[in-house]
Image (spheres, grey):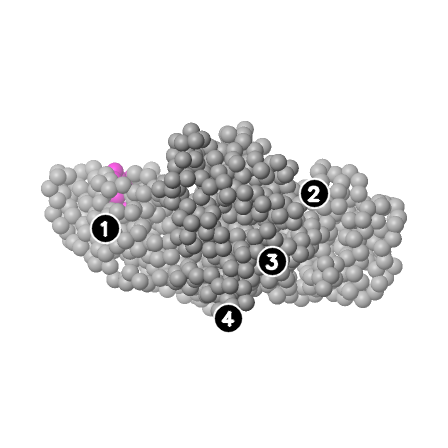
Amino acid sequence: MTSTNRLTCILILFLSLFSFVGNAQTMNNSIQIIPQPNSLELGKGEFKWNKKTKIIITNDNEELKATADYLADVLTNITKSPVKVTKGKPKTKNALILHLGKGQGEESYELNIDKNRIIIEALKPAGIFYGIQSLLQMIPVEGGKFSLQSVQIKDNPRFSYRGMHLDVSRHFYTKEEVKKFIDLIAMYKFNRFHWHLTDAAGWRLEIKQYPLLTQKTAFRTQANYNDFWGGERKYADEGADNAHGGYYTQDDAREIVAYAASKYITVIPEIEMPGHSEEVFVAYPNLSCSGKPYVDSDFCAGNDDSFTFLNNVLDEVIDIFPSHYIHIGGDEAGKKSWKKCPKCQQRIVDENLKDVDELQSYFIKRISKHVTSRNRSLIGWDEIIDGGLASDATVMVWRGKEKGEVAARHGNHVIMTPGSHCYFDSYQADPTTEPKTIGGYLPLQKVYSFEVTPANDSLAPFYLGGQGNIWTEYMTDFKRVEYMAFPRAIALAETLWSSKESRNWDDFKARMANQYPRLDLLDVNYHRPSFEIEMTEKVDTVNKLVEVKFESELNNPVIRYTLDGTEPTNESAIYTSPFTIDRIAHINAAVFVDDQIQKPILKRKSGYHRAVGKKVTYNTKWQSYPAGGETALTDGYSGSLTYGDGRWQGFTSNMDVVIDMGSIVQLNSLSANFMQLTGPGVYIPKYVEVSLSNDGVNFEKAFRVESTVPKEYDRLIFQDFVGGLENKQARYIKVFAKNNGGFLFVDELVVN
């Protein structure tokens, strides 16, 4: 199928959904476009499409003509009447006019509809394309004639870089599936496709000078990545009976590049280095420190053959991909072999380097010099900061906003893609109800809250934009990719295109209601809006209250709740606004549809307790996950479904802390809530032991509670360790939790 025909079919489906949901844009209804335009003014009256309406182009421009032709094909199918494209003037009546003229930037557009004509005006063809995407979301297709509300839209993107990433190494997807991914992101005005082509799970791009890369490492003995990575990690020769995988020929890649360009999307290739390169050394073991296959993961930085190989590979990549940016990975290099490798150690001496971190910096700078010599620019993950940052490199930040600020202060450009908001391999709803994935928790609302730029306005000019990442360890087929990407990619699209002032979560939810039927008709296996309820808290230490607020992905849901631990019924209180509680409550809340309770039911313990604000002494310190630091365990905030929410405090050792109640007080109970999620190595403790003291020196054991969760249980689960204190008196409460291997996460120590 040709590029034009394929896009025509997709746009027909895109438009046809509106006959499914009715006239979504009635004269008395707001226009519902995603991403939200920056300026939209409704007018009076309407434009009526009829059999004589035609498309007018006012400029001699091949891109503009191609855009007009496919739009004519779509409208011909919708109206069941031929739509012609002709050259004409901007004032032509009864026409849809595509005009290259004024604009705020290369991607800006104006869309004006009145009773006489529709005009899309832009400085460049890209703006025309984006204006068409907005127009298509307005057309109430019911066959034959249709009418469009009079409106004036002025729109331009907030950020120049609006990207989506797809990892095709861990699981391989066909050329047609990659094109579908491009189709979908183009509809929401993304303009970059980051194609992760190489990794330890398989090399996916033909390199003519090094044919063994695809002949020996594009296939493996297990189709499922987790079976491969958790097993022998063996590759298979192309054509072998047990070979699973695939690769893209250079012609395939060029075809995809051209296809994306027709949607005004630039394809950025990623070739991983110096780490994540185990597959390379099966084909060319001399490039590793050991010189043996299946031993190392990092290129030997002391071997000039490594740089010759990589330069040659990059030369072929650059010839295929016209992108200004070339991504070289740079993340998670182990560097273990470098510490013992004579060649690497000699390189450190010869280049007057301090350690292996500076050796990695040397490696990246040397590659960057070659990329620059080909008139391109290097992008790398934020590990390229370590040991010294190349002055001309662009940093793709995944480990947190602090890394972005480091790069920006250095004068480097930054693309934000933090795991907290942009890693779409995380769970998007309650993990107990979702297909298994790597971990984390990233619901739609949190994606929508993403903010690219830092609080420091002086650094903002260095931030190019953001990107959503699809890492595919658990995505064995493309349907699963769709499920993890959408609708979160749509939420991200609005954060990258629309102004901060024009964004509103409740309004976005309402507009999303018109997107789901479209995705259905495009046969997209998207994640359906969840009945899950998000709960947030606000602690008031002055009045000793906790304010509780419920949120949902659904538009105006009916939520009923109880505070005594019982399941809500039709008689339970209806949530209308945030409420406060002055003591520990066992909250249950659920969405009701047609008086029927919907699963899952939110179950959280929350409220003000006696230890809120009390000092905690750490005999063992947290690691990597401080939450609120030394006040985290008694700040009154409970944790959500993810340890990354800033409420869970993480320990890699035993937890050993002491709460100082300030004076000797009478105690009734203590509880400590822990989580288990084995994928990222989070385990419930073997036991929790509580001891009491009046002087902070001599402690007497009060109770010990054993874990009831098997260590091998591999889905998200929580255990609240609760013990009675039987009206005992004490000032100091010691809480000890025995680590069961890996991380130990606790949210709040609740004292009553």
Density class for disc 4 (Cα within 10 Å; few <14, some 14-19, many ≥20) is few
Which residue in the protein does label 1 denote?
A: 737
C-alpha separation, residue under disc 1 versus residue under disc 3 = 51 Å
Say what amino acid the circle numbered 2 marks.
Glu
Q: Is residue 96 above or below residue 459?
A: below
State left or right for residue 411 relative to residue 334: right
Asked if marks 1 and 3 touch (Cβ < 8 Å), the reply is no
User: Is 614 part of what is drawn in magenta?
Assistant: yes
Say what amino acid the circle numbered 3 marks.
Tyr
Closer to the chain start, of discs 1 and 3, is 3
Asked if marks 4 and 2 touch (Cβ < 8 Å), the reply is no
Closer to the chain start, of discs 2 and 3, is 2
Q: At numbered mark 1, what does the secondary structure look like: helix, strand or loop? A: strand
Say what amino acid the circle numbered 1 marks.
Ala
Q: Where does residue 361 sit, x and y in percent of width and height?
A: 47, 36
Say what amino acid the circle numbered 4 marks.
Asp
Looking at the image, which residue is at 72% across and 37% down? 104
Which residue in the protein does label 2 denote?
A: 107
Which residue in the protein does label 4 denote?
A: 241
C-alpha separation, residue under disc 4 versus residue under disc 2 = 49 Å
Density class for disc 1 (Cα within 10 Å; few <14, some 14-19, many ≥20) is many
Closer to the chain start, of discs 4 and 1, is 4
Closer to the chain start, of discs 4 and 3, is 4
User: Is 382 part of what is drawn in magenta?
Assistant: no
Closer to the chain start, of discs 4 and 2, is 2
C-alpha separation, residue under disc 2 versus residue under disc 3 = 31 Å
Q: Magenta segment, which residues?
A: 609-616
Which residue in the protein does label 3 denote?
A: 248
